[in-house]
Image (cartoon, rainbow, N blue to C red):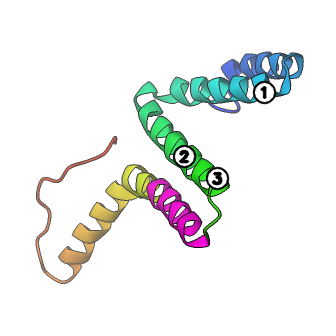
Amino acid sequence: MWFNSSEFFYFLPIVLIFYYILAHRAQNIWLLFASCFFYGWWDWRFLILLFISTVANYSAALFIYNKTEDKKRKFALYIGIIVSLGLLGTFKYFNFFIDSFITMGSTVGVNLDTPVMRIYN
């Protein structure tokens, strides 16, 4: 589902109506499920990545909230950032980095054009 699609034209008002009807705590849960539905409409297989990212960052936020030692809080922050950037780098930019590495090798005369793993072409 794209933001300019007819599906989104129907999806958004439904989400907004329920959002304003529900209590505050329920609004957050509703938006979580609506976001997962929206993301899953594009490709349901990537919902596991969204789940991993959500759990990792939510856990890091709870840890930061509950601890008073700055060292432990910073460590949790760094772990959350590493998980998020790791997922982004792997699943969004992996193919780009591999193609760039192969092109760079061929520029200096090294044939690196061998079969490589591709992530969702």
Going by the image, does 20 lie left or right of 68?
Answer: right
Q: Is residue 83 magenta?
A: yes
Quadrant occupied by the C terminus: top left
Q: Position of residue 70 (x, y in %)?
A: 61, 71
Q: Which residue is mark 2?
A: 59
Measure the alpha-carbon separation of dots 3 and 2. 11 Å
Residue sitting farthest toward the right = 20
Q: Which residue is mark 1?
A: 25
Q: Main secondary structure of the magenta part?
A: helix
**Of the image marks 3 and 2, the number of the one nearer the N terminus:** 2
Q: Which residue range is magenta in the image?
A: 70-84
Marks 3 & 2, CB-CB < 8 Å contact: no
Q: Write the residue at 53% across / 66% down.
A: 72
Measure the alpha-carbon separation of dots 1 and 2. 18 Å
Residue sitting farthest toward the bottom = 108
- Quick one: label 1, few (<14), some, or many (20+) residues within 10 Å? few
Q: Write the residue at 45% across / 40% down.
A: 52
Amino acid type, mark 3 = Asn
Q: Position of residue 8 (x, y in %)?
A: 70, 23
Above or below for 75 versus 51: below
Quadrant occupied by the N terminus: top right
